[in-house]
Image (cartoon, rainbow, N blue to C red):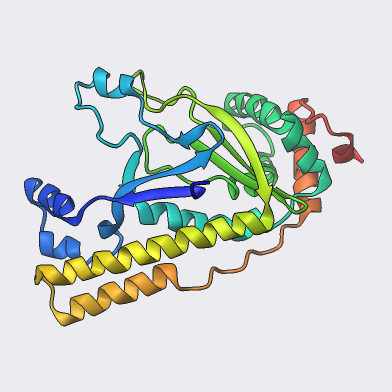
Amino acid sequence: MPPLFGFRLRPLSEIVQGWRAADYDVQNYLKGWFWLTYGWYWIVTPDGDVPLNNLEFNAAFALPQDLDPHLDYQVARLWIDLEEMLPNILEPLPAELASAMASGAWETWWSALQVWWEKLPDDAGNAESRWDAWYLAISWWASRHLDMGYLKAPPVFRFWRVGDTVTLSWDTREKRVEGALCWVETQGQTTLPVGEFLAEVEDFRARLDTAMQGRLREVEALGLLDAAARASLEKQHHLTLHTEARPAEPTDWNVVLSAIQTLEAGSGMLLGREELRR
């Protein structure tokens, strides 16, 4: 089986060539470990690699077809965001929300709630308390959402844990820029044991570690950086891939469920879980 988190670094010569073509300061960019991780990455699902570029997008903007169909960006971005959300992923959901997620009730309720929220006038009464309820009701969900806001039409990936199982969901449908679909459209979810998920995360870190150690040797061989700049790159490498992730603050699920009740009462739309209205 291929790794859950796939990636490939773009050859350094191509990266440098691109910087020079754009009239960037090559020496300055070589000093940034993050920039050196430019390449392609994806998540392997039962439906195949996600996301994959949609041919319609290139055709719509008269762009050449991609030699690699995967998302191209700094691979470090995926690692940094995944590591940041990992403590939240590993915190199990309470039974009430686990059931709502499994049945699809949460997504349905959330979509309807957004419509209600956007129609509220800015000067509606108790605005501050509504904002507090909104934040408390959805922050747990947002913290399990892979942040890809650096893209104009980001695919959606979410991870959550129920018991000893982690669920991964994905959705690349109807992600458009100026009307053109960005990604091959697919939606679904899959599960894996917590231990297996953690092994996949560590495998991703280890493979990126190895690849970037090789990349740093390539940079040194160029002879464009002094000893201090090379030492800085090594430090950036260590801080990104060899530093313990911060522990997450435990979620007060009673506060979350109470906030959901507040939004249910205000909107008149029920999540559909009797346990939430005990």
Please report the residue visible at 25 percent of the width from the left and 50 percent of the height from the top: 10
On screen, residue 80 versus residue 195, left or right, reads left
Image-quadrant location for residue 228: bottom left
Residue 129 drawn above or below residue 182: below
Q: Residue furthest right?
A: 278
Image-quadrant location for residue 106: top right
Residue closer to the observer: 268 or 31: 31
Residue 176 drawn above or below residue 157: above
Residue 238 drawn above or below residue 145: below
On screen, residue 175 versus residue 170, left or right, reads left
Residue closer to the observer: 111 or 47: 47
Please report the residue visible at 19 percent of the width from the left and 76 percent of the height from the top: 229
Q: Which residue lies furthest to the front in this view?
A: 1
Residue closer to the observer: 93 or 208: 208
Residue 112: % across, % down = 66, 24
Residue 156 drawn above or below residue 230: above
Please report the residue visible at 89 percent of the width from the left and 34 percent of the height from the top: 274
Residue 98: % across, % down = 77, 42
Residue 176 visible somewhere in the drawing? yes
